[in-house]
Image (cartoon, grey):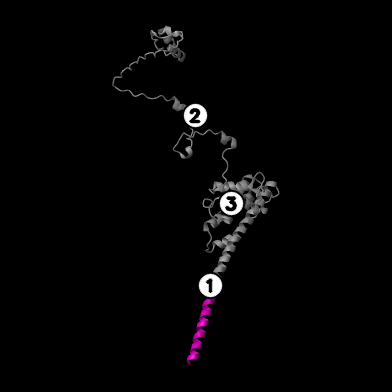
Amino acid sequence: MSNTTFETFLVSGLLILIIAIGYLAWSAWRWVDRERDMEKRSLDGIRHEMRLNLKRLLDELRGISDGTLASEIDVIPVVHPQLDALLTRPNEADRRGLTIIRGNYNELSAHKQSLRTALASAGGVELPANRAVQALIGSIATLYLWEEHKGSSPERARSTRTWDVRDWMKATPFDAHALPGLHLRDEVVAYLRAEGMTLTPKPLTHTAHEFYSMQYDRKADPNAPFWKRKPKKDTAEQVAEDAEEPVVETSSEPVEAPVEQVVEPDPVQETPVERAEAPQAEATDTNPQMSEAEPIEPAAEAMPESKPPSPGSVH
């Protein structure tokens, strides 16, 4: 074999090996990507499956309330093949969320069986129907957490506005007034808040009149944040504290009687009018000659003395 033939054979073998490795890598990537897509579709199928089961239960409860459903045959058992298929194989989904959904299905199945028994025996269906309504509200809340919060628990779910929950229910077939005497959206929001989910804004605890009528003692506890008020005591405790008398400790040492202090009377103070008139009165009494003003004559100017005339002077 010549060198040219050997080099051609070697290059061809390397090319075939590179192509084979690339094809195997592409096949493995395609298989993994397909499994991921199938898992997403399965999780989405669980969402649709649960929504259909809840919608069917809501229609059945509505029929029981208005009297259009009176036979146990119309109450269809709960089936969930998508969930069963997903739980039989490992996946990357939150197993806790899937477990909660499975528990809700078991609860709904038990309540449906109670409704079927009550309808078959022609007994009262009010109590089983009320229990089924409560289970329906909890299942709708679980479906909301599964779709919007990736199946997390209410405590770990992020803070959400209540209107987001209401908007989600508006997009689903759950009508707020589907059941008479019950607002379904408010009940779901109250259930999520009771389970520990943070929903804003928080419900008001006082009316406007009650809030502004509250009297705050801001100096009751200065060390507290924002000077919060101390808890008020009950009327019975306050009366008991007022009724208690202080205990006086007795000692063997003699107790000296307190010395009474004699308080001397203060001198009579003169009124401002008397003090103002006093100097004028004293001046009048001590110098009576100065009481009348005497005119002062101007002193005569000193004139030079005249000399006696000399004998020879002529006048």
Reply yes or no: does residue 187 show up in magenta: no
Q: What is the x, y in percent for residue 111?
A: 60, 50
Residue range in magenta is: 1-29
Which comes before the other along the chain, label 2 or label 1? 1
Q: Amino acid at mark 3?
A: Ala
Any part of residue 7 in sight: yes
Question: Looking at the image, which is closer to me, 88 or 307?
Answer: 307
- Label of residue 28 in the image: 1
Would you place residue 220 above or below residue 165 in this image? above
The secondary structure that dominates the magenta segment is: helix
Query: Pointer 3: what residue?
Result: 141
Question: Looking at the image, which is closer to me, 237 or 308?
Answer: 308
Which comes before the other along the chain, label 1 or label 3? 1
Query: Pointer 2: what residue?
Result: 235
Residue drawn at x 49%, y 88% is: 7
Left/right of residue 256 with respect to residue 275 in the rendered view: left
Q: Amino acid at mark 2?
A: Thr
User: For the residue labelled by badge 3, is the local secondary structure a helix, a strand or a loop?
Assistant: helix
Would you place residue 204 above or below residue 268 in this image? below
Which comes before the other along the chain, label 3 or label 2? 3
User: For the residue labelled by badge 2, is the local secondary structure a helix, a strand or a loop?
Assistant: helix
Residue drawn at x 52%, y 74% is: 25
Question: Looking at the image, which is closer to me, 20 or 175?
Answer: 20
